[in-house]
């Protein structure tokens, strides 16, 4: 009996080792598709944007097939843990709270966070009592407002497009998001001349983390390492910079 138990234990260890040493031939990326210029959804349902181009470039660098999986933000981490895809590349900030559930690569982008409002809004950031500010639900922006502005009326949305619509209709006074997405979604859009950035530029790591990283399941550390090496390689080869130049007028990587 003891001999059988030893053999079974060795077999289990071998199987576990094989599972950990997965041969990655295809990598599936979960991408939101509603956060331009990082990602957006075309009329035919295909996804475009910086995150999509980065995913494809990373796969090419790792010599694996690439599959893009559209995923709403609300379920983006649960769907990763449920193995709907292998990694998340969706302008997701690296935060201590998220690290409890998933592992992250090093950053692949770093963007300040801003408020945007109509030019005649007249917001006083010393007194925002009762002001309606829109955020995307379950984001770092949501948590920042919740922790720092207890008298603000936070209005939560499934996507920033919904928030922009309510901002235009006057249902909310401002939106908090990352500066690049707000620039693309509002300032550079039709009618954008009527809006402006207001208030402080927010980068505090306590809420906004250490930049945007690619999230991976904790047990898939080998994939995290491969992605880290690929990000570094794309930067060394200048491929990252070529991709970024298509979407940003500034250094989106930061220092």
Image (cartoon, rainbow, N blue to C red):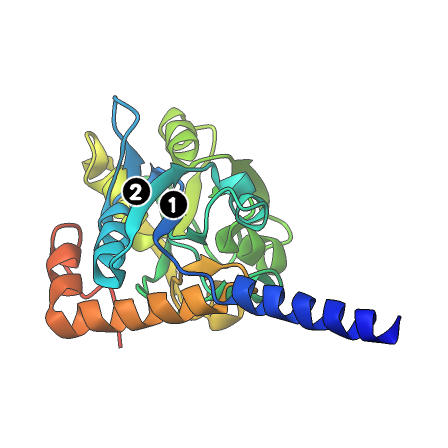
User: How many residues crowd mark 2 within 10 Å: few (<14), some (14–19), many (20+)?
Assistant: many
Between disc 2 and disc 1, whose residue precedes? 2
| Pick the front one: 82 or 116 | 82
Tag 2 near tag 1, CB within 8 Å: no
Q: Is residue 134 left or right of residue 46?
A: right
CA distance for labels 2 and 1: 31 Å
| Pick the front one: 119 or 187 | 187
| Pick the front one: 85 or 247 | 85
Q: Position of residue 139 (x, y in %)?
A: 51, 50
Q: In percent of the image, x 21 and y 72: which residue is there?
A: 233
Task: Classify the position of the C terminus by image quarter.
Answer: bottom left
- Please say if 141 is above or below 48: below
Q: Which residue is mark 1?
A: 122
Q: Is residue 107 visible?
A: no
The numbered dot on residue 9 is: none
The numbered dot on residue 39 is: 2
């Amino acid at each position: 009996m003891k001999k059988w138990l030893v053999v079974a234990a060795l077999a289990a260890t071998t199987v576990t080792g094989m599972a950990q040493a997965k041969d990655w031939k295809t990598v599936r990326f979960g991408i939101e598709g509603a956060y331009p210029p990082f990602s957006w959804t075309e009329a035919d349902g295909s996804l475009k944007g910086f995150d999509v181009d980065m995913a494809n470039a990373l796969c090419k660098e790792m010599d694996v097939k690439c599959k893009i999986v559209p995923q709403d933000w609300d379920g983006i981490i649960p769907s990763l843990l449920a193995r709907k895809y292998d990694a998340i590349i969706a302008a997701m900030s690296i935060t201590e709270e998220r690290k409890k559930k998933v592992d992250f690569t090093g950053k692949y982008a770093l963007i300040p966070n801003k408020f945007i409002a109509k030019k005649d809004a007249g917001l006083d950031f010393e007194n925002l009592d009762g002001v309606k500010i829109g955020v995307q639900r379950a984001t770092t922006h949501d948590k920042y407002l919740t922790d720092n502005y207890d008298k603000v009326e936070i209005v939560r949305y499934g996507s920033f497009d919904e928030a922009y619509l309510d901002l235009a209709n006057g249902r909310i006074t401002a939106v908090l998001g990352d500066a690049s997405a707000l620039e693309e979604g509002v300032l550079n859009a039709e009618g954008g001349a009527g809006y402006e950035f207001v208030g402080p530029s927010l980068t505090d790591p306590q809420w906004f983390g250490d930049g945007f990283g690619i999230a991976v399941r904790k047990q898939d550390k080998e994939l995290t390492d491969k992605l880290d090496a690929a990000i570094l390689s794309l930067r060394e080869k200048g491929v990252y910079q070529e991709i970024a130049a298509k979407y940003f007028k500034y250094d989106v990587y930061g220092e």
